[in-house]
Amino acid sequence: MKVALVHDWLNGMRGGERCLEALSELYPDAPIFTLFYVKGSVSRTIERHRIVPSLLSHFPFVARLYRYYLPLFPLVIQAFDLRGYDLILSSSHCVAKGVTVPPHACHVSYIHTPMRYVWDQYDAYFGQGRCSKVEQVVMSMLRRRLQQWDVQSNVHVHRFIANSYNVAERIKRQYERSACVVYPPVDWQAFQASHSHEGFYLMVTAFAPYKKVDLAIEAANELGISLKIIGHGQDVKRLKQMAGPSVEFLGWQPDHRVREFYTRCLAVLFPGEEDFGIVPLEAMATGKPVIAYGKGGILETVIPLNPLQGMMIDVVSDRGANPGICLNNKRENPAERVAQTDISQSGLTGVFFYEQSVEALIDAIQLFKQHQTDFDPDTIRAHVEPFDRSHFKQRMQQIIMSRYEEFRRLTPC
């Protein structure tokens, strides 16, 4: 079986690249096809593979200005020649799933989210004050066309795997396709529970608009609490201008340094709505609580001190997905179903706030302070073990091979 891996782009180690890294361990001989690649920006495990960048990698300043080439992404990703491969495995949050699939090849796509730039997060990237007037006009003209391509390209996907029930619901709503769920991996064994702290709060994030780093900075400014931020991105200049003296920007840090900051912090702030969110799991693997916006994938990983009242609970499963608990959040949208993993009753792991405002985040921080002793580091760490990297690889291998074998039985030679 000849395997090809496809990933949107390689310019840093974020959640999607952690998943790609585990997949690349499953298929160590597979080349990785990607829109562009910044050498040295990803792990050695990924860089051991033959990496095949697209023609886009020759465009001017692509590593820094790649978002401006978004309208070209569909054409570029479809230009890859994957003839001769038996199995194509894409890791996609943008266009990787739209790769051209040759006849007699099976395509399994692991979806971090449908293309957020043209669906759920469109306003976060192209709304008022988020970009120039020219960009707003261009994207308003192209959005519908990109949405149509995003849906039409699904004909080349033989099996969807979602990174959360949250994303599986989105795939069902926007693509009208089902998806089984495999949670992203956390290198749980690389962390240890920390029973001490140095009094500061921590964020580990890219500086993208939907991450809501500005909420954390404003809350830290108002409360005068120490906040350290690991990461960088497009909003760095604006965010630094907002920051008061208690906020410190640390840039990107290597993995061992990030783990060190987890052990030293009081709690991790997570104010954005995420498709899944690996950072909260890494924090909890170190025994640290998470103060998070209570919507999206975070509902599947954190046991909050303050869940919303009036949640309806039922059990869901989907074609091979492990059963999970589904929460129906009456307070915000009765039709929106937010799925949750099989929650253990081991204890609390965080605090939620339910409105993306500075005031709501401040209230959550103050609530955490009042109940700080209710959070046990060893209990929090134990909660994360089911998300360990080994479980991810085993589950992915089972689903991929099951679909590949089924495809081979149904496809004539």
Image: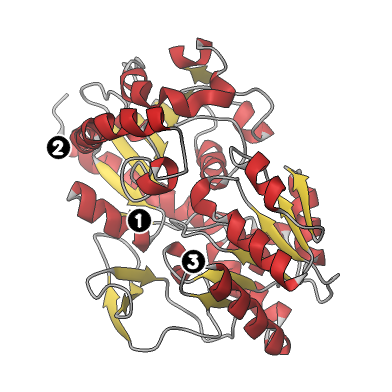
Give the distance between the C-alpha atoms of the residues marked 2 and 3, in whole angstroms. 48 Å
Q: Are marks 2 and 3 in contact (CB under 8 Å)?
A: no
Residue 265 location, x and y as percent? Answer: 78, 67
Is 101 in front, or is 111?
Answer: 111
Residue at 50% from the left image edge and 81% from the top image edge: 344
In the structure shown, which secondary structural element does the residue marked by tag 2 occupy?
A: helix
- Identified by mark 1, the residue type is Val
Residue 410 image label: 2
Is 176 in front, or is 51?
Answer: 176
Mark with earlier residue (3, 1): 1
Give the vertical position of 138 relative to 174 (above or below).
Answer: above
Instruction: Identify the residue under disc 3.
Output: 356
Give the vertical position of 301 relative to 260 (above or below).
Answer: below
In the structure shown, which secondary structural element does the residue marked by tag 1 occupy?
A: helix
In the structure shown, which secondary structural element does the residue marked by tag 3 occupy?
A: loop
Occupied quadrant, residue 187: bottom right
Give the distance between the C-alpha atoms of the residues marked 2 and 1, in whole angstroms. 28 Å
Q: Nearer the viewer, mark 3 or mark 1?
A: 3
Whether residue 267 can be seen here: yes
Q: Residues within 10 Å of mark 3 (few under 14, many from 20)?
A: some
Q: Is residue 369 left or right of residue 7?
A: right
Q: Is residue 398 left or right of residue 286?
A: left
Q: Is residue 87 left or right of residue 272?
A: left
Is 326 in front, or is 249?
Answer: 249
Whether residue 178 can be seen here: no
Residue at 65% from the left image edge and 48% from the top image edge: 239
Q: Nearer the viewer, mark 2 or mark 1?
A: 1
Residue 271 location, x and y as percent? Answer: 55, 63
Residue 23 image label: none
Give the vertical position of 262 relative to 412 (above or below).
Answer: below
Instruction: Identify the residue under disc 1.
Output: 167
Q: Residues within 10 Å of mark 2 (few under 14, many from 20)?
A: few
